[in-house]
Amino acid sequence: MNMPHSADASAGRRWTRTLSFGMTLGFGAIFFATIPMLGCESAHKSSSDAPAPSTTKTSGEWSERMQELSQSLSQLLPLVADHRAFNDPAKADLVQKSMSQLKAMAHQVKHQVQKGNKPSSDPAFTPIAEMLDEDLARAIVAYQSGNRDYARLTLRESMSYCIQCHTQAAGGPDFSGRGGLSVNTDNFSPLARGDYYAATRQFDDALKAYLNGVKDQQYAKDDLFAWEKAARSALALSVRYKESPSQAREVVKAIQGNPQTPPSLKDSARAWLQSIEKWEREKEPDSRLERADRLLKEAEKRASSATERGQDLLYLRASADLHQWLASHPEPNAARAKALLMAGKAAEASRDMNFWTLHERYYEMCINTLPNSVMARECYSNLEESVKLGYTGSSGVHMPREEVERLKNLRARAMGENTKAK
């Protein structure tokens, strides 16, 4: 996304970055949150990495919310996909009712998480749930004030978070072929169709929809931005959720086979194929954390080469491993702090394919996991640099007072300082 560069827009720039994190939460985070044990947990990992199962009570609570969500989603998604329908005065009551239902569930999810009642130890879950309530409130206010295009954009972009949550790592069932929600996708673009299927955990159908879009020359010619997003979504789905080098290869071959593919992306695709070939020869590691460490070091080394985005596939693989490991290791110790630091680096390096500010949340969680440590200080250094960059304009850094105070407190925790004594 493009960021403003003027001095007056520096604060707005930071808000826009944060909003891109928030505005993409909507349906996706709720949908993710309301499926018991379907967050970022693997359906096929070793027993040493397997998380403890949730209690029956917890699963039941999330399942009940899932049933409530289905009706709201089935009503709202077609309206969000259709500009005229969303702005139709005759459908205003239906839109507001569906949005209010989602908002109410978001509020419940936030309080459940605050009480420690959540279906996964994956670190991505907590910031998503915490911001969800605020983001849906923003969409509702925008709709009620007459800014319906903005409200629709906020809700539509929320699908991206749903996809990111569901495909952060291998985990949970694929509902492809089971009918899903009763939404007619005939008039959806390839990207919108793929996003819908991914948002509703119909991953085989999502990958097929994305691939159809990637192979479509006219689609790439008419809307290169959406086409490239579909290509990157297909790659992320095949790597992080499917963990399938063969399916990743199919995606890359489709990218290379479209005459409209930009030269820079073709260069990246060649590097991705090299990574896939190496991936296919690998044996299963003793530890996902160790493999993630190796993949990150390889990606960072490759990032200094001429290939613009050739390291993306490595970051995606590392991210999947880290989320698998973190979901099954909730203990606040040095190993978890290290994993959060690495997750932050992976998310930051690939944030145009990821949550725009999720890396900052990882760094913050790293600090709180192991305060007054070398790890915490490295996490703070990365966090401070990212936050300042987000507020930097042509006249310098302009951070709100509350953000300055937040950094001050996090620095104190990272450095072992006593702020009250100063």
Image (spheres, rainbow, N blue to C red):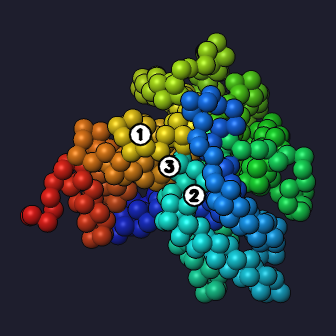
From the viewer's perspective, is residue 363 above or below residue 156?
above
Quadrant including the C terminus:
bottom left
- Is residue 305 shown left or right of residue 60? left
From the viewer's perspective, is residue 1 above or below residue 94?
above
Mark 2: which amino acid? Answer: Lys
Q: Please provide percent x and percent y for residue 261.
A: 69, 34
Q: CA distance from mark 3 to mark 1?
A: 10 Å
Which mark, by number, is residue 131?
A: none
Q: Earlier in the sequence, mark 3 or mark 2?
A: 2
Secondary structure category for the residue under label 2:
loop
Residue that label 3 marks = 123
Secondary structure category for the residue under label 3:
loop
Residue lying furthest top: 281
Picture quarter containing residue 159?
A: bottom right
Q: CA distance from mark 2 to mark 1?
A: 18 Å
The residue at the point 73 percent across, 54 percent down is: 199
Q: Please provide percent x and percent y for residue 144.
A: 64, 86
Mark 3: which amino acid? Answer: Pro
Residue that label 1 marks = 336
The residue at the point 49 percent across, 40 percent down is: 329
Picture quarter containing residue 345?
A: top left
Which mark, by number, is residue 118?
A: 2
Mark 1: which amino acid? Answer: Arg
